[in-house]
Image (cartoon, helix red, strand yellow):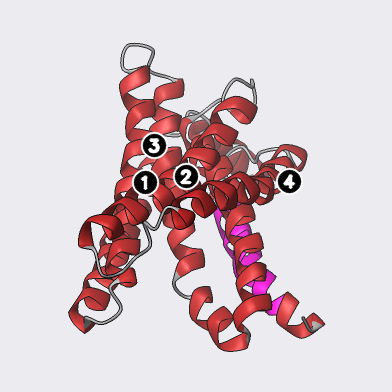
Amino acid sequence: MSPTLLILAIIPGLVICFLIYKIDRFEPEPARHLSVCFLLGILCCFPAIYLEGIGDSLGYNESESLGNLFVFSYIVIAGSEELVKFLALLFYVYPKKIFNEPLDGILYAVMIGMGFATLENVLYADRFGLQTVMVRAFTAVPAHAIFAIIMGYYVGLAKFNSKKRYRLLFFGLFFPILIHGTYDLFLLQQYYEWLMVLATFTLLVSAFFAIRVVRLHQQNSPFKESFLADSFEEEE
């Protein structure tokens, strides 16, 4: 792989990391933990690839069978990928004191998701070349960010709601799998153009929801008032 192609494969994930980091205005998270989450996302690729390989060897990727495509999309691909990312979020950063507001769930989940998407993009670049990398920069990589935002939203709520914790954690895994699986199911049926349109529609609806929940957490941040007060004092 050429250095240029490698850089092009890495840039989309890093750009999204930078954008999501800038959203956390009121109490920025430590760079060390953000970096660890990104690296954990990279490592998550390996068990996901192993699990997907098992599903592939069992024949669940056969496009002739709609039932097999359902299993391959929702369980083999979406299930394995979202599960390993969810476990990385749950066991590394969820118990830590630095996870001190719901927005942190989104931030750390996106870092994990972008680590995963970046390595995945590099692997696709090595196998399929520049054209695939350019397409994935506007489809698969942002899709992983959207799945991560939805996951992080519910995990962030669960952290601070002991009564509904397990239900919210379940949603934090279920909804990313549902959206990811639906998106993949449409794309895998490549012979039907209208299904490609539905895949794009699924991504756009999910993106709209993701933007809404990020703004909601920003507005409800417990650090918002102190941040604004400090900014006002600096101006005076």
Which circle's residue, 4 or 3, is located before the other in the chain? 4
Depth order, front residue of 89/56: 56
Q: Amino acid at mark 3?
A: Leu
Q: Which residue is label 1 attached to?
A: 75
What is the x, y in percent for residue 199?
28, 69
Name the residue at 22% across, 74% down: 195
Name the residue at 66% across, 74% down: 9
Residue 203 vs 155, above or below: the answer is below
What is the x, y in percent for residue 81?
49, 48
The span from disc 4 to disc 3 (Cα, nearest Å) is: 22 Å
What is the x, y in percent for residue 144?
47, 57
Q: Amino acid at mark 4?
A: Ser
Q: Is residue 123 left or right of residue 68?
A: right
Q: Residues at badges 2 and 1 in contact (C-beta under 8 Å)?
A: yes
Q: Residues at badges 4 and 2 in contact (C-beta under 8 Å)?
A: no
Q: Which residue is label 2 attached to?
A: 80
- Magenta stretch: give its range: 7-21
Dot 1: within a 10 Å radius of its alpha carbon, few (fewer than 14), some, or many (20 or more) residues?
Answer: many
Task: Count the numbered circles shown.
Answer: 4
Residue 35 - label = 4
